[in-house]
Amino acid sequence: MKQFFFLSALSVAMSLFATPAKGASHDVDIKKPDGTILKGTYFAAGKSGPGALLFHQSNRTRKSWDDVARQLAAAGINVLTVDTDPNKTRKQRWPRELDAAFEYLVSQSGVKRDVVGIGGAGVIGVEDSVETARLHPAEVKSLVLLSGETESLDFLRQASQLPELFVVADDDEYPPIVEAMELLYVTASNPGRKFVHYSASHEAPWLWYEPFDIGKVPAKGGHGTDMFKPHPELPGIIVDWFVTTLIKTPGHALANTVASASVINQIQMPGGVAQVTQQLIEARRKDPDAQLFPEITVSTIGQDHMRAGEPKAAIDVLKLVQLAYAESADANETLAEAYLADGQKELARQHAEKALAILDSHRLPASSWTDTEQYRGEIRRGAEKVLKQLRVGS
């Protein structure tokens, strides 16, 4: 019995050593190829899951990410924060320093090396984040960029598969950061990218450059991770973004109306529906889960045609919505109404019945944008009304 107890205890001890406890953190030394040491802190999720690498701004250290890192670890994401030297040039940091941090993260037990998120604050942190994503395009599935800029605009323009969260505040102490972040946002091409902009009555005055002569510019809470204090909801926004793009739907975020503006405008132009339909088909060949626009936004365009007494135009748009969101009860029910208005009874019946089947399965949400019981009830009433009208008219 004593021997069994000893072996059991040894087994438990080895298991705990192999898989760090959830939320546990410890400081680490990361050796770079030149033999110098990069200081970091590793936050273990305690189970197999994605990884996240977080870079700080020039006037802060890795500690500024601690709260977010703990929340990410609690949510199942293993996190590495690192201290980089803002006084080093890009040539001195890239790619050795960035690769050393990245390789340390993905080498840890339980980290899914092909599902990694990168976050950065300030000019240095943002540039290091984008460069790391450029160096590891197959592994990096999500970016979070706070108050910075980058020379790699071409990469953001071409990386249509990479969802990005951009955050900036008007009272940032290092203008013109707002304009720089807006440039990053409009350059990026992922339809799920998101822009969080904290407004103020006016932008802060220019005093000095961020990466140089730290101390010349008083910190007032508007830059990078300093925004966490005046905007306490921001860490939660970041955590939710990484949970969505690394755990729930790796490499994907819900298509955003503003981010999809060019596609939405194209849909409303003559011949635009056919063009976007072809774009979606081509995008799906590369990525079966690709989305080019939000369901509800384009559905509203179709419903506007219905309200204007243009059922054929409505059908064209709503067929595109149903193609993009085939398993949405909402998309099928709305298309059923359009077919009924146009006298296409069999197609109206098919889509009304599909809407009800999706609702009855309780396997899928009612739509991509909401799944409340109230809205499920509205969809059901709409589909049943279509079928009732078909029975009366038969």
Image (tube, rainbow, N blue to C red):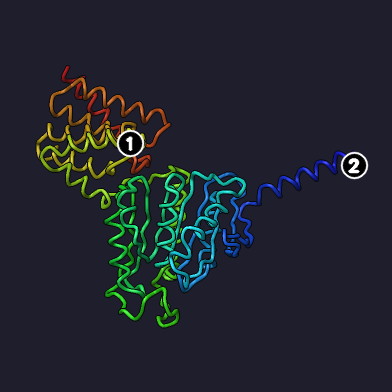
Residue at (64%, 60%) from the top-left corner? 26
Q: Earlier in the sequence, mark 1 or mark 2?
A: 2
**In this rendering, the label closer to the viewer, 1 or 2:** 2
Residue 58 lies, in percent from the top left, at 46, 71
Q: Nearest the camera: 386 or 161?
A: 161
Residue at (29%, 50%) from the top-left corner? 189
Secondary element under disc 2, as helix, strand or loop, is helix
Crowd rating for badge 1 (residues with CA inside 10 Å; few <14, some 14–19, many 20+): few
Res 4 seen here: yes
- Quadrant housing the N terminus: top right
The residue pinned by badge 2 equals 2
Rendered position, 379 above or below 41: above
Residue at (31%, 31%) from the top-left corner? 326
The residue pinned by badge 1 equals 377
Crowd rating for badge 2 (residues with CA inside 10 Å; few <14, some 14–19, many 20+): few
Q: Nearest the camera: 209 or 172?
A: 209
